[in-house]
Image (tube, rainbow, N blue to C red):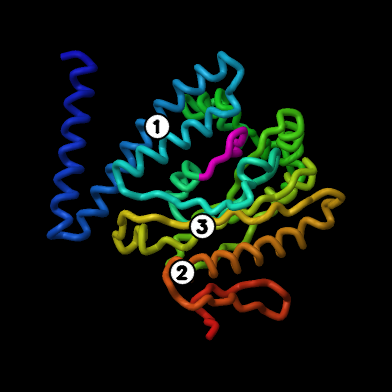
Amino acid sequence: MSFSSYLTYFLVGYSALVISLYMLSAVVPKAAFAARSLAAYLSLVICAIYGAVASIALRLVGREQIAQWTTARAFKYVMAATTGITFDIIDPKGHLKNTRPAVFIGNHQTELDVLMLGCMFPKYCSVTAKKNLKNVPFLGWFMSLSGTVFIDRQNSKDARQAMAGAATEIQKRKQSVYMFPEGTRSYSKEPDLLPFKKGAFHLAVQAGVPIVPVVAANYSHILHIKDFVFKSGKIPVKVLDPIPTTGLTTEDVDELTRSTRELMLKEMVALTAKARNQPIAMPAQSDDGVVRASGVDTTSS
């Protein structure tokens, strides 16, 4: 039997399993978690293959800088069809289209943030990755072909040194980047942010480009892995005004990091409350000026 025949049988069987689980979810709600998880994984594989092919084709015509954008958009539409989930992008001033180059930053809740990138990823933008991923088969090849901005942490003592090469790439290619300053997923059930790492802010200051915060409302009602919740729905995402870095130095990074995190948390709390039709809650602030509490700790009348 040929490879194509095995692949066809696999896809038919996989699809049948997903459909069966979706049907079973009418009786056993948690079956929807398995159904959407399998559907999301298959969607990701399909779009990764498409992305690799698209990256090669676009590189041949000198358009590799939009490879990650076209792959992201493909994932957006495939996921909407297979899982019923999408992100509603609120960008009335057109910052995603008009601000370039820039360092885009966003809150990081779960693995579903890959879909969030699919819905909002601007043209001429890429993710960042450690330089040692360049040589990883398939993943590294796709990243290299699609214009990923690589960060050399191996030979760097601090975040400032690690970002130096990436800053040069941004300036030379007018390539924006997207980063998650929390560094890892929070999996929070309520609007909250982990402490921010400073790498994205060092990068923006060194490159002399603005920071554009992007805030997604808390979506634990859509996906919460610990409770086996995975539902269809639309999640609002708000693009905030760019924060200029012109004239700033390394000494300003701490305050820039603190103030940006505070701004994003307030916007996240407000956006989540609006999405849930709840009163807007304001995060509590400690004596040292650091916002620590999530939006469930205090509410406004």
Residue 54 image position (x, y, % from top left): 47, 22
264 within the magenta span: no
Give the residue drawn at x 52%, y 80%.
Answer: 297
Q: Residues within 10 Å of mark 2 (few under 14, many from 20)?
A: some
Residue furthest right as drawn = 247
Label 1 sits on residue: 47
The residue depicted at 53 percent of the width and 28 percent of the height is: 67
Look at the image and give the residue range highlighted in magenta.
120-129
Q: Are marks 3 and 1 in contact (CB under 8 Å)?
A: no
- Of mark 2 and mark 3, the one earlier in the sequence is 2
Q: Amino acid at mark 3?
A: Ala
Q: Which residue corresponds to mark 3?
A: 216
Among numbered discs 1 and 2, the one appearing first in the sequence = 1
Which residue shows up at 57% across the image and 62% down it?
194
Looking at the image, residue 20 sits to the left or right of residue 77; the answer is left
Say what amino acid the circle numbered 2 marks: Glu
Residue designated by label 2: 190
**Mark 2 or 3, closer to the camera:** 3
Looking at the image, which is closer to me, 34 or 276? 276
Q: Is residue 191 left or right of residue 178?
A: left
Q: Which mark identifies residue 37?
A: none
Question: Which one is in front, 193 or 59?
Answer: 59
Q: Secondary structure at mark 3?
A: strand
Q: Secondary structure at mark 1?
A: helix
Q: Closer to the N terminus: mark 3 or mark 1?
A: 1
> Above or below — where is 189 with respect to 80?
below
